Image (cartoon, grey):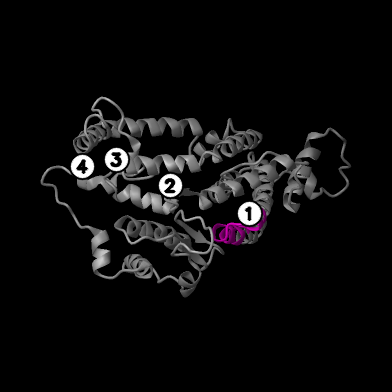
């Protein structure tokens, strides 16, 4: 990218530093210009106010483009989303660079925290090179499209989406069927690998230009402590829970070995990931019936209860909303139900991965899900609405 064009305030900040560093003799009789004086908290507050106004509009534009792309995956919507993402990324890098100009200025805790958050606002920092920023935006859009359109077509011609495969993973107790689903998704995702590898290269370059060792160091800097301290704290907490986790892991492996046989789940090797009831082996709740301790309270089969009480996707969302309103939160706006995606459309590709959206930082709240009538999905809806209610309250 050609050198970034800073916002008006950022340009003033940059000029002030450049002039302050040069050794030219100044006319003391002339009035001191804003560009020549030291920066103050008033300058920082003005910069933050201008930035807030600018980002409110940019985020709205970006959110709308991303929403359309996620719900109507085509080459055209991918291109539009990439263009807007590129525009937002460029501006965020500009603002992060401008915010750094205030690093040595004495500020209130409030202003300092806002500036620090602004410097760390990007999840994927782009390099300061126009071509590379455009490339990164295109990669992000392409990855989203591959994820949303991914399908596995079986020998009989039946094609399964990620949601279909995830449902099988959650309910099947057939070793080979679960393995088939696990491997099928990883075949679908193979074209993503080179794109993701290139994305890592680009974001690491961008992070280094912002003063971080790499993107990971930048991410670890977002927790009100230095990146290295965060890593140490994570290790400290992990050491506390590790004995419990190892015991849990041992118990689950033993139960799965009983279920599928020691030839498939050896007691001295890692658990086959495809048997954990989740496409990413990230949660094990779907196999509770297999691994629950003897005589344990089986709890409720929410999936069966949803069927018995004729819960469709809207009633499931209303039920989750009812939980939050029972805590004293205001009901969701009617536009939430008009604009959200609750079911996978039959006529187009969409990204079904559940997500919560706050498009305008006011009341345009939405979720995007391809809801299935299961207890796990009911839990996910509560999770997503938790984001929505927090977004509105914030």
Which residue bears the numbered disc 2? 155
Q: Name which of mark 4 and mark 1 comes first in the sequence.
A: 1
Q: Earlier in the sequence, mark 2 or mark 4?
A: 2
Q: Nearer the viewer, mark 2 or mark 4?
A: 2
Front residue (pair 32, 165): 165
- The label number, if any, that marks residue 291 in the structure image: 4
Which tag is nearer the camera, tag 4 or tag 3?
A: 3
**Quadrant holding the N terminus:** top right
Residue depicted at 43% across the width and 70% down the height: 332
**Location of residue 179 (image quadrant):** top left
Would residue 185 be found to the left or right of residue 85 on screen?
Answer: left
* Residue 234 part of the magenta-drawn span: no
- Gap in angstroms between the C-alphas marked 4 and 1: 43 Å
Mark 1: give few (<14), some (14-19) or many (20+) Cα within 10 Å. many
- Determine the CA span between mark 4 and mark 3: 16 Å
Residue 199 is situated, as x and y percent measured from the top left of the image, at 60, 38
What numbered label is drawn on residue 78? 1
Instruction: Estimate the x, y position of residue 341 in percent, counting from the top left.
Output: 47, 65
Q: Taken as a whole, is the magenta stretch helix, strand or loop? A: helix
Is residue 303 at all visible to an observer of this figure?
Answer: yes
Q: Residue at x 56, y 40 (%)?
A: 191
The residue that appears at 74% across and 48% down in the rendered structure is: 6
Count residues near mark 4 (Cα–Cα under 10 Å), then give few for <14, some for 14-19, many for 20+. some
Q: Please tell me which of labels 4 and 3 falls first in the chain.
A: 3
The residues bearing labels 2 and 4 have C-alpha atoms spaced at a distance of 33 Å
Extent of the magenta region: 62-81
**Residue 213, numbered label:** none
The residue pinned by badge 3 equals 175
């Amino acid at each position: 990218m050609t050198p970034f064009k800073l916002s008006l305030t950022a340009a003033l900040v940059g000029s002030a530093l450049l002039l302050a560093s040069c050794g030219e003799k100044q006319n003391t009789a002339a009035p001191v210009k804003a560009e020549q004086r030291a920066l103050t908290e008033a300058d920082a507050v003005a910069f933050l106010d201008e930035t807030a106004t600018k980002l409110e509009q940019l985020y709205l534009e970006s959110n709308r483009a991303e929403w359309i792309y996620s719900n109507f995956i085509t080459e055209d919507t991918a291109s539009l989303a990439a263009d807007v993402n590129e525009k937002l990324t460029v501006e965020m890098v500009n603002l992060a660079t401008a915010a750094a100009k205030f690093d040595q200025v004495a500020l209130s805790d409030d202003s300092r925290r806002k500036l620090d958050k602004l410097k760390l606002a990007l999840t994927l920092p782009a390099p300061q090179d126009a071509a590379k920023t455009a490339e990164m935006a295109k990669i992000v859009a392409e990855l989203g499209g591959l994820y949303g359109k991914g399908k596995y077509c079986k020998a009989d011609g039946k094609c399964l989406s990620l949601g279909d495969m995830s449902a099988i993973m959650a309910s099947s107790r057939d070793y080979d069927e679960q393995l088939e689903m696990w491997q099928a998704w990883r075949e679908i995702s193979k074209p993503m690998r080179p794109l993701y590898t290139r994305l890592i290269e680009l974001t690491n370059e961008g992070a280094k230009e912002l003063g971080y060792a790499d993107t990971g160091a930048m991410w670890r800097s977002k927790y009100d402590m230095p990146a290295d301290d965060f890593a140490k704290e994570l290790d400290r907490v992990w050491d506390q829970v590790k004995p419990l986790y190892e015991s849990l892991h041992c118990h689950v492996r033993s139960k799965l070995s009983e279920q599928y046989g020691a030839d498939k789940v050896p007691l001295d090797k890692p658990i086959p990931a495809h048997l954990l009831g989740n496409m990413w082996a990230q949660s094990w709740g779907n196999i509770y019936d297999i691994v629950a301790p003897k005589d344990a309270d089986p709890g409720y089969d929410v999936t069966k209860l949803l069927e018995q009480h004729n819960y469709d996707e809207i009633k499931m969302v209303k039920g989750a909303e009812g939980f939050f309103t029972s805590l004293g939160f205001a009901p969701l706006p009617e536009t939430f139900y008009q604009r959200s995606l609750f079911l996978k459309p039959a006529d187009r590709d969409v990204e079904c991965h559940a997500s919560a959206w706050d498009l305008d930082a006011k009341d345009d709240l939405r979720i995007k899900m391809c809801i299935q009538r299961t207890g796990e999905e009911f839990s996910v809806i509560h999770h997503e609405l938790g984001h929505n209610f927090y977004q509105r309250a914030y």
